[in-house]
Every structure is written in C-alpha cells, then in structure tokens.
Amino acid sequence: MRGRLRDLGIEIGDLPTGTHNSITDVAGVRVGHATLIHDEPTVARTGVTMIVPRDGGIWTDFAHAGWFNFSGNGEMTGLPWIEESGLLGSPIGLTSTHQVGLVRDFLVKAAVETGHTDAFHLPVVAETWDGWLSDADSFPLTEVEARMAYTSAAAGPVAEGCVGGGTGMICHELKGGIGTSSRMVESRSGVFTVGVLVQANYGRRRDLRVDGFPLGRHLGFDVVPSAWDEPPNGGSIIVVAATDAPLLPIQCSRMARRITVGLARVGGYGHDSSGDIFLAFSTGNHLPVSKEPWTVDVLPHREMDDLFHAVADATEESILNALVAAETMSGQRGRTAHALPLDRMEELVALDPRQ
Amino acid sequence: MRGRLRDLGIEIGDLPTGTHNSITDVAGVRVGHATLIHDEPTVARTGVTMIVPRDGGIWTDFAHAGWFNFSGNGEMTGLPWIEESGLLGSPIGLTSTHQVGLVRDFLVKAAVETGHTDAFHLPVVAETWDGWLSDADSFPLTEVEARMAYTSAAAGPVAEGCVGGGTGMICHELKGGIGTSSRMVESRSGVFTVGVLVQANYGRRRDLRVDGFPLGRHLGFDVVPSAWDEPPNGGSIIVVAATDAPLLPIQCSRMARRITVGLARVGGYGHDSSGDIFLAFSTGNHLPVSKEPWTVDVLPHREMDDLFHAVADATEESILNALVAAETMSGQRGRTAHALPLDRMEELVALDPRQ
Amino acid sequence: MRGRLRDLGIEIGDLPTGTHNSITDVAGVRVGHATLIHDEPTVARTGVTMIVPRDGGIWTDFAHAGWFNFSGNGEMTGLPWIEESGLLGSPIGLTSTHQVGLVRDFLVKAAVETGHTDAFHLPVVAETWDGWLSDADSFPLTEVEARMAYTSAAAGPVAEGCVGGGTGMICHELKGGIGTSSRMVESRSGVFTVGVLVQANYGRRRDLRVDGFPLGRHLGFDVVPSAWDEPPNGGSIIVVAATDAPLLPIQCSRMARRITVGLARVGGYGHDSSGDIFLAFSTGNHLPVSKEPWTVDVLPHREMDDLFHAVADATEESILNALVAAETMSGQRGRTAHALPLDRMEELVALDPRQ
Amino acid sequence: MRGRLRDLGIEIGDLPTGTHNSITDVAGVRVGHATLIHDEPTVARTGVTMIVPRDGGIWTDFAHAGWFNFSGNGEMTGLPWIEESGLLGSPIGLTSTHQVGLVRDFLVKAAVETGHTDAFHLPVVAETWDGWLSDADSFPLTEVEARMAYTSAAAGPVAEGCVGGGTGMICHELKGGIGTSSRMVESRSGVFTVGVLVQANYGRRRDLRVDGFPLGRHLGFDVVPSAWDEPPNGGSIIVVAATDAPLLPIQCSRMARRITVGLARVGGYGHDSSGDIFLAFSTGNHLPVSKEPWTVDVLPHREMDDLFHAVADATEESILNALVAAETMSGQRGRTAHALPLDRMEELVALDPRQ
C-alpha cells in the first residue's frame, strides 16, 4: 500500500476534505470496482468501475447533471439526454475503450432486472484506453465484471490506483488509474460536499506538477523509464464530480467545466489523442419519475465560487491520488508502467520553499 | 388595417390562444415599438421593438432563459451569460443590424438610470437587416427610438407588421415585419400561456406555406412582384418566446429549439444569409438578485409536449400574422416591398379541401 | 411490395433525385440490413442497419462530419470525437435502444479484425426503441446481426420499411422503419448528391402531413387503429445525411441542423420522449490517417442553400418512404402496428388542388 | 516602464517566442490602443483596444475562427455567425462592459466607410468591467476612441498594462490590463506562430501563481493592499489567440478551449462574476468573399499538440505580462489598484529551487 497524497504531507487548496476524502463522501454515492488481471489466454490488465448515485435509487429518482467535453477523443455514452434534459438516470460506468458497449448494455439489463421497465434507459459509460498493457483487442471483459462492479458498489473508502476501470491506465508516463478526493464548502444554504473520481490515463511526464511544483521536470526518463518505448496512440482522463449541493443542470455544467482547472494544474493540455470528458451531477434534489410538478432548491449562481474551487482542487488531488496509489505494473509484450517514485517525490517537494 | 390571420378564418394547430393572441398574454410581458420613417436627410424605414418581461422588474428578478442558433448569420447580444447561467436580466431589444450596439448600450443606460448599478448588465438585443428599403448605412436610429420603444412598452394588443424593429423587413419576398401569437396549455401543474413574437425578414417566395398549403407556388412574381430586382444580401428571423410555465433554463432551451418547427412549416430553411436566432424565457419563477437559496417550481420534462406544440404553432402563426399585417412599403432607390395579397390568399386557401 | 412515395405520384420539393433516390446515390456509400424476426424463445422484431461510407475505407480515410441533437431522448455513440475533430472514422450503426452497445463494440472488433489496430476507435451507433412490438428486454440481438448488416452492405437500391434497425419501429402511430431518399444539386463547384436515410419511430398520428397536406387529420383511429392501446414510452428518429459535396465539419453541422426542417414538415415536434438525433457527413475530401498536411476543397457557405433544401426535402421524403414501404406487423402481447393505408392516402391527396 | 515577465528571468514553457513575443508576431496582425484617462467631467480610466487581422483585409478575406465560453458572465458580440460558419470577418474590439455596443456599431461604420457595403457585418467586440476605477456609468467613451484604436493599429511591439481596453482593469486584486505573448511551433507542415492577447480583469490575490509558484500566498493584503475595500461586482478575462497555422474552424475552437489551461495555471477558476471568453483565429488560409470554391490547407489534428502547448503557455505569459506591465492607478472615489510589486516577486521566485 502506497497511501495517498496527504500521507506525503501535501494538500491541495484551502478547503477541508470530507470524511474519506472520496467521492463517496457525498451521501448516497457508492463506488464499486471489478479488476481483471490475467496472462492467459490473453493478457488482461483491465476492469470496470461503477459510480452508483443515490444508493442505487437513481433509476427512478434522477439527479441533475451536466457535462463538458474538454478534449473529445473519447467516449461517454448517454450524452444526448443529459444535454437535452439535464437528468442522470443511471449508474456511471468507467472501463476500457473497446468495451464501453458491453458495460452500457449491462446497465440497461440491470435496469430491466430490477424491474425498471417503465422507461427506456440511456446509461452513462465512459472509457480510457488500456491497450498498452492489456491486450484490449482480445476483448477480455465480460458481463461478469460489469455486474461485479455494480453489485459491489459501496459507501466508504474507495480503492485507488490499479483497480477497476483504472487497472491498465498510464498517466504522465507513469502508472495511473483511479483516484478520488472530496471537499466541503459552506454557504448560506448550508454545508455541501463535492466529490471527484478520476480514471487518469493522459499526459506527458515533463508536464507533471504537484501543487504547482514542476515535478515532471525532475523525473526524466533516466530517473524513471517512460511507460512506452514507442509513441502510444491513446490517453485520456474521465472525471466524474458529485455534489449534494442543490444545483440545476446548467450549474452542473458550470461545475463540469471547472474540472478543467484541476486537470490543467496537474499538467493536462487536452492533447489531440486525449479524451478528457467530464460529468458533474447533483443529488441535492429529488426528481422522481412523475408528471407531478417538481419543487427544487437552487443554490444561487453567486454562491457557486466555492464549489468551483472545490471541484478544481478535488480534481487535482484525485489525479495525484491515482498516481500515488498506483503500483508498477507489467503487461503484454514485456511492457512495464512504472509507479511514481514516492521517495523521490517527497525529497523534491521538500525543497519547495513555498509551504 | 389588414387584420390578422384568424380574420381570414385560418387557425394554426389545435390549442386555444390567449386573450390577445399575443406575447403579452403572458402576464407581465410588455411590448413597445418605436418606428422611424423619413425620406430626409436619408431614407429611414427602421425602428426598435422592446419586449419587457415582468412589468419591468427584470433587472432585479431574473427569468430563466435559453436560446437556439438555428442559422447564425445574425446577432443577438447577451448570449454568453444566458449560456452560462440560464438567466435573463434585461428587456429584449429588436432592431436593425447596423445599430444593435446602440440599443444594447441604451439598455445598460436604462439600468443605470433606474438605479440598478449594483450589478453589471449584459442586455439581449437582436437584429435583422432592413438595408434594402432603409438607408441603413446612414445609421438613422438614435437613442431616442430605443428609449421610446422601452418606455412605451405596454400590455395588451401588440401592433404588427411595419412597426418597430420590423418596419423595413421583407419576408418570403413580401413585406414582412413584426408578428405575434399565443397559446394556452393545460397540465397537471396548471394552465400556462406561451407567447411568441417574431421579427420576420427571411425566405423565398416559392417556399411560403399557410398551414401546409403551398401558397408561395401560387404567388409567382407575375402575380406579386418580388421585393428585389437583384439578389439581396441579408434575411433573418428573430423569434422570442415567453411563458409563465415554470421552466428551468435547460427547458427554455428545449422550447427555443422547437421554434424551428414553426419556422420550417411556413417555409424557412435557415438559408446561409439568414440569422435565425431564437430566445425563450420563463417568468414562472421569481429569481431575485440574492445569495439566499432559491426554491423553484419545475414542470417535469414529461409534461412539456404541449408547450412544444404551443411554441411551434404560435411561431407559425406569428410569422403569418406579420405577413398579413404588413402593408406595401416603398423605400430607398425606388424599391417597393409588396404586401401579401389577402384576397388572393383567401381565394386560394378556400380551394383547400382539408379543413 | 408497397413501393415508394413517388409511385403514388407525390414528389417533395423541386430538386431532382439521384439514380436510386437513396443514400447510396452518394458514391461509395453502402447500406446493409440484418433483420431479426422470431417468436421463440422470445418475440423479436428488431435488427441492425449499417451505413458504410467510402466503400469501407472509412477506417483510414476519414469523412468530415457534424451532428445535431434536436431532441436528445436517445443515444448516438461517438459524439465527443465528432464534436472535437469533425471526423467520422467508422461505419454508422442503427439498431434497438437496448443493444446499442453490442453494435458499438462490434464495430471496434470489425476494425481490429480488418487490421486497423493503429488507432483506437470510437464508432457511431444510434438507436430508436422497438420495445412495443419486440421483447427488447430479452436482448435478442447478437453479434451475428451486427456482422451481417456490416458485411452485407452494398451500393444500389436500399430496402425500406420493416428491415434492419427499422424492423420494429412505429411512426405517427403507423408502422414505420427505414426510409431513404436523395437529391442532386448544382453549384459552381460542380454537381453534388445529398442522400438521407432515416430510422423513423416518432410522432402522433394527427400531426402527419404529406407535402403539407394534413393527412393525419383524416386518418383517425376509427380509420386505422393506433399502434398502441396505452401510452408508449419511447419514440425517436435517427437521420443520417451523406454528401459528396466538399464540406468542412462546421458545414456538416449546418446540414445536420436543417434536417429538422424536413422532420418538422412531416409532423415531428421533438417530443419529450423522442430522441431525434441527426448526423451529416461529407465524402468530398480524402482525409487519410497521417501527420502530413491535408489540402481540402470547400464549398463556400454562400453556395450551401441548395444543400439545405436538398437535405430537408430528402429527409421529408425518406420518412414518407418509410411509412409507404412499411407493412402491417404484429408483435409481442398481441400488438399490431398498422401500415399507412396507401389507397386512402392516394384518395385524400388527390383532393388536394395544389399540385 | 516596468518591463515584461522575461525581464525578470521567468519564462513559461519550453517553446520559443516570436520576434516581439506578441500577438503581432503572427504576420498581418496589428494592434491599436486608445486610452481615455480624465478626471473631469467624470472620472474615466478606460479605453479601446483593436486587434486587426490580415493587415486590415479581413472585411473581404475572412479568417477561420472558433470560440470558447469558459465562464460566460461577459459579452462578446458576433458569436452566432462564428458558431455557424467559423468565419471571422471583422477586427476584434476590446473595451469596457457598458460600451460594447458603441465599439460594435463603430466597426460596422468602419466597414461601410471603407466601401464594404456588399455584405452586412457582425463584428466581434468583447469587454471586461472597469467600473471600479472608472465612472463607467457616465459612459465616457465615444466613437473617437473606437476609431483611434482602429486606425492606429500597427504591427510590432504592443503596449501592455494600463492601455486601451485594459486601462482600468484589475487582476488578482492587483492592477491588470493588456498583456501579450507568442510562441513558435514546428511541424511537418512548417513553422507556425501562435500569438495571444489578453484583457485581464479577474481573480483573487491568493490564487495567483507564477509558473506554478504560489506567489499570491506571499502577497497578503498587508504586503500590498487589495484593489477594493468592498466586494466588487465584476471581473473577467478576454483572451484572443491568433495563428498562421492553417486551421479549420473546428480546430480554432480546439485551440480556444486550451486557453483555459493557461488561465487555470495563473489562478483563474472561472468565478461566477467572471466573463472568461476566448476567441482563436487562423490566418493560414485565404477565404475571399466569393461563390467560387475554396481550397484550404489543413494542419492534421494529430499535429496540433504543440499548438495547444503554445496557446496555453502564451496565455499564461500574457496574463503575467499584463500584471508586470501595469502600474499602480488611482481612480474614482479615492480608489487605488496597486501594481504587482516586482522586487518582492523577484525575491520570492528566486527562492524557488525548481529552475
């Protein structure tokens, strides 16, 4: 166990975290992982992660949602309906590029199996590409992993690094994967939680920064070898933000756009090959399937600045948590993605006089 | 006085109209026109129309709003803030292309003059091009007309045809201008009004339809001369829809998009030279300038179909009302835009067996 | 065989059609269908349709593309990359709502199988809901149908009505399905073809119009029973437009938006339950996978008006072709969707004095 | 003269700058400022900046363009046409919030005066709010300043800080204003220049970073007083990026979106009151007003990464150049906005071990 960023004495921003410093700090949000690692018959370093809002009641009690396509070389299903209605009505799956469809159709099946046949379903499933370490072209995932991620989703601490959809991911040319973080914000409307979860698989080594410190410049390929010996053809980051602040869909979109700030500060540029797609949802109002009028609370736009800080800071820390947690992994064709060297990182950041 | 479409026995769609069959049927919505017609020192056939929501209280009690850019060869100011926040915080001006800025800055001044200096202002002003009949290049409008349109805004019946911003407009190669219409819809949440106002300045003669009847095919240039003897370089339609149904911004955007349906049925294609820009706003919730949380009512998405019919039908009828009301007008350089021949229209539509 | 709209003497608009009055009139565009109809073990009335651009070379020679979300209660995968880059790099699948993922992942596999492993793939697959006639909840489609639709794709005439992805569809409360049409346009840059294919599954009976004639008002449920005895929970239309005119991505988006015009004229309103999602692509330039600079031809925006008419008219005719071709079909639970009564339609339209 | 960031030994990113490290390094791009400072009859600290592409030939030889609305509490006119066509056809004005319309209409007049009456005009003018130092409510600007900024536009070095539209601006609670920077990128298609110009008026002190170093944390209000003693009601940044790389409109939009990266790294969050609106244009192709087909060069998407780095880095440096150049300014009501203390900044950044 390599721990988390805060174990190294580094904190991002001024706002306090929630209990677990995790997206599950938002009440009702659960996360489950299914990790698939085998070397036969093909090499698999892959998996599925599920974010289940509202303790699973999301099928019939929607959440307001919005999204942002910072760099669209990726897939997130379910977008036309979110764009049209601002309603999220399914768990959110994260997985490997080639098998988004499998996980998407499984979520339809999960709705059917649990008796939610009264509406048709447009689930949200996103991906990043794990085909460097994993033999993605062998399509190793089956419905088993999708189901396991879904049924195992739980509140509380969330496993990070090489788990679930993040299993085979590479970030800043180091081993990447799943990371999460949260922040608490106070407003006249109450205290709210913002939680973020990332599947991080993007970026160049030399661009990596830790709270502004240009760590990547000090981690040359002589220090830690690059994950690849030839140019890869993918790289992306999916970010999901949840909050219990009562937001309208247009406000969720505002939050989703500010996720870019956190990504930029770690060293993301939205490269051409990168699918940097962000989703934000709010559980702060109940929106049951009904023709009866809804009454919803709304946090005024003027009170949103702290949420913007929260989502940017939690995104930054989530990515760094993914890097800190992920361990060196070898995969197909003798390839190895090396972990961020924590000792070297501590040593370097200690030089920084700014704290 | 040439009357309105319904005076000819033609009704669009199944839904009933409001009292005045006008955008002012939405409680609190006022409309004012300033019409500028002179031949010296330059030829002016132009003006300003103002739509003032909430009896003028819009500066400090916002309305949810959304927009749609069906064909963007035009201008509507204030869009970034509507896109970001879904809030309309000013009256809406309609005028001539060259002088959008004048009317836009006047609305800032109007806010300042009425003491609303506590926020900065991003007014919504849109345009269509009247430079065929009017010497637009002489910039004939002044702040006087903007102010007059604003201060004269009133509830009740709305003048149509060659008035206000619609003064010099040409539609389907006939005299166009301002038109309006409204519809009432029932839902489990109550009875709501949808009102539409258009500034119509687009389209080819042969594409004109009246409730599906291809009137344009029967109104060749031998029957009624075209408005122009050489190809014009503009043409657009601005459509503003108001409702008292309690809608979120994303729902206003949905309504704005369905305005396209009404335009398409009359014969709009969104030509390259056409700025077909639509705005929809809802007065159904009060959104005071404040950091206190708002509580808003929401009509569920599932109840919106009648609103979609209402806005499409009222758009169709508004355009036809503009054509029916507008009288033949001569302008600069001996040019004349001919009115829709009402007798011929009645005769032709009477042949239609469908009613 | 019930024929096509033009067999009834009805033509939409002024522009001539291509050879087959089909999307395959655009050189290099192929269409394939796989139709799955069985009553055991579950009732299936479903299938897959594939539109294969560039004679299959689309994996390595992209097409410019754009899309429009008129009413987003539906799914189309692959949108973030089209939004980001304007590049289409896969065949386009059309199928049933519940199994979009299956067809999407199959297209990744098809890329891998044909050796295109040098890029990762974000295929475009869209859906409409066939769960009224078909037991969609039994997930009857397998990779077999996806593959069959793909490998059988051919140039020339295209089967319409109850075939492929359109098998179980219902349109204007009559039997719907697949329809196609094309138009030729002349410009200073040459003669170009615009082809459209629809999977039509939307709308209310009473709103149906044929070239403006309000046919739906004359086809009450006493004349032809409604397809359903209780309110259905779906309904959508997917429209794909192809052209060999050399368009930039932003121009494809312009075309996609004008598809709305054709839909509106037949009687589409973009109802809340309707996923009306449109894609337009241009094969007019070759865009090979490469880092070498591209040189592309561009039809100036000012020359696009005829393309707008073409795509609107071809959309209108495609929908009507779907209705004309589709035959009465019975499905699960004793349900029947009745075909448009062609004799009654001819009789009624003959009354119309306008032609 | 306080100089520029590089005079302090600080460089942003790895790419070389152009000759003047200015947006005018892009061939044909000119910049002009008109600065209005007076204390009678009202206090004015305002002005107009013009960016004139293509040596002024932009009226008849368009540039591809795209935009991004990171935080839309601001105004940029001309957006619907850029969204529709991807064509920029006017100089770009930057000024004070209240008088955007004045500058916008002036640009129409400038087109008319120079004989470009054959098309109607939809100029691009953006704003940030200078009403803290300047008595904006007195509307001090006239057409004189707009014209002066336009006619004085020149190639070569660009004045920064308290000039033109940036005169009264405040950034990170220090004196802000105009800043510019440029980068050179090499590709298989040739060497290209990316230039950026900002009008910077946003942000909190404590969030300010210089190349990642958290300078703002060391510049408390005891060190340098805040610009305001009560909460202000505005704050925004407009960023314009130009390049001679041959880009399509959709690629300009990609670049515009990456401007966010540079802003985020300096400390921008897109606060609620901030209008952070970005425009990017490419002069790399000639697009004359014509119906003749265009042939355009296109840099493949895969070659865009260096452009993304260039625009992000040049944005970061442009903002810092604005802060470095801007001198302490007093304005209405005894208010003072203090300049960034360069000596303190050098001292602090020297402590940073990372360089």
Image (cartoon, coloured by chain):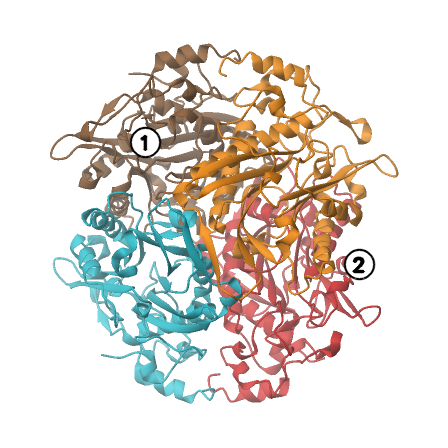
Chain colours: A red, B brown, C orange, D cyan
Image quarter of the N terminus of chain B: top left
Point 25% across, 58% down: residue: D56
Where residue B269 sits, quadrant-wise, is top left
SS for tag 1? strand
Chain letter of the residue carrying label 2: A
Point 21% across, 50% down: residue: D110
| Residue C108, x across and y down, in percent | 70, 56
- Mark 2 neighbour class, 10 Å CA radius: few under 14, some 14 to 19, many 20 or more: some
User: What mark, if any, has residue D282 been given in the picture?
Assistant: none
Point 39% across, 15% down: residue: B345
- Mark 1 neighbour class, 10 Å CA radius: few under 14, some 14 to 19, many 20 or more: many
Residue D108 or residue A46, whichever sits in front: D108
Above-or-below relation of B109 to B218: below
Left or right: residue D260 compared with residue C52: left
Amino acid type at mark 2: Thr
Where residue C207 sits, quadrant-wise, is top right
| Residue A240, x across and y down, in percent | 61, 60
Amino acid type at mark 1: Val
Alpha-carbon span between mark 1 and mark 2: 62 Å
Above-or-below relation of D140 to D268: above
Residue B293 or residue A138, whichever sits in front: A138
Q: Name the residue under label 1.
A: B31
Q: Can residue B154 be seen in this snapshot?
A: yes
Dot in front, 1 or 2: 2
Q: Name the residue under label 2.
A: A142
Q: Can residue A331 be seen in this snapshot?
A: no
SS for tag 2? loop
| Residue C67, x across and y down, in percent | 54, 46
Above-or-below relation of A32 to C8: below
